[in-house]
Image (cartoon, grey):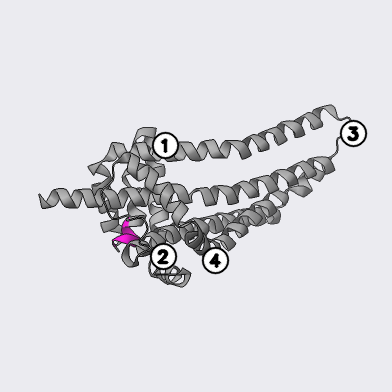
Amino acid sequence: MENGIDLKRPRDFGAVFTTTFAFLKQEFRPLGMAILYIVFPFILISAISLVLFMNRFKPFIMNPEAIPSSGFLMEILLFYILMILIFLVTNVLLTSTVNNYIALYVEKGRGNFNVADVSARIGTNFWQILFTVILTGIMIAIGYMFCIIPGIYLAVSMCFVYIAITYDKKGFGDALSRSFEISHFQWWSTFLLLIVIYLILFLIALIPYFIILISIIGSMTVTELNDNFSPDKLIEVIRKLSYMLALLTILFSLLSVIPMVAIAVQYISLAEIKAKENQL
């Protein structure tokens, strides 16, 4: 099989950007198969759990004056916690799958590994990535609590931590230090790359968002203008919206692969540039 794209080479901003989409195009089928077998069942479970959670409020729509029992509130709380855990595991699996796939691609070459290899590799660092997702999420959230700028700074500085774990096989502390080191080497370039990539995702997401917005406006119009409006109709509107949000959950999960690949390509590129400069 042909060698394919060589990720382990220095690239400027434009080359990183074009390589990201070229890599996604080249590896669409094998990477897609890995995501399909390893992650997609959890993405579906996440979407279904969202639908079920939204529909749990049906009794109070039918009877708005009803006072929820403590047992029902506890059930809602437990369901919500379970749903958050499902979304967390899904995010960790997706992050681990994409980054381990790229690490194997660089190590073994294009076409020299399969889904089983990716799955086996995930088993070696799943809990480490889970811990990293939680801890970095808390750190970035604290940064945003103080001010937006510290949050942005931390988000960019720590964006390489997952690829450092899978590609360089580092522990959390070393991976975090490596992420800061590599990101600070070209912080503004990395920041600009993330801005452009997420802007593209935002523009793609506008279409389904407009569909939901139109649906919400339409449902409000019906609510206000239809004299025969009933709780049953409101339940129907909420049910349709829950389906739309479930579809968006699936769409956004799959679209998040794009920034993951872009971050990995940028990391490997900057690591190569830094290594060459250190040799001089």
Above or below 102: residue 249:
above
Residue 105: x %, y % from top left: 37, 62
- Asked if marks 1 and 4 touch (Cβ < 8 Å), the reply is no
State the mark number for residue 228: 3
For discs 4 and 2, the disc positioned in front in the rendered view: 4
**Looking at the picture, does residue 115 appear above or below residue 82?**
below
Q: Please give the label number shown on residue 40.
A: none
Q: Is residue 273 left or right of residue 249?
A: left
Foreground mark, 3 or 4, reads 4
Q: Which residue is mark 4?
A: 37
Within 10 Å of disc 2 (Cα), the crowding (few <14, some 14-19, many 20+) is: few
Question: Pointers 3 and 1 in contact (CB under 8 A)?
Answer: no
* Amino acid bearing label 3: Asn
Q: Tell me which numbered mark, 3 or 1, is placed earlier along the sequence.
A: 1
Asked whether residue 244 is drawn in magenta, I would say no
Q: Rounded to the nearest whole Å, what is the CA distance between mark 3 and mark 4?
A: 47 Å
Determine whether, in the image, residue 113 is placed left or right of residue 203.
Answer: left
The answer to which of marks 3 and 2 sits earlier in the sequence is: 2
Residue 65 appears in the figure: no
What's the CA distance linking mark 4 and mark 2?
19 Å
Say which quarter of the image contains residue 132: bottom left
Give the magenta part as a residue range.
164-168
Please, what is the three-letter code of the amino acid marked with disc 2? Answer: Trp
Labels 3 & 4 near each other (Cβ < 8 A) = no
Separation (CA) of disc 2 from disc 1: 31 Å
84 or 245, which lies in front? 245
Q: Find disc 2 in the rendering and name its residue.
A: 127
Q: Which residue is mark 1?
A: 196
Amino acid type of disc 4?
Tyr
Disc 3 on helix, strand or loop? loop
State the quadrant of the N terminus: bottom left
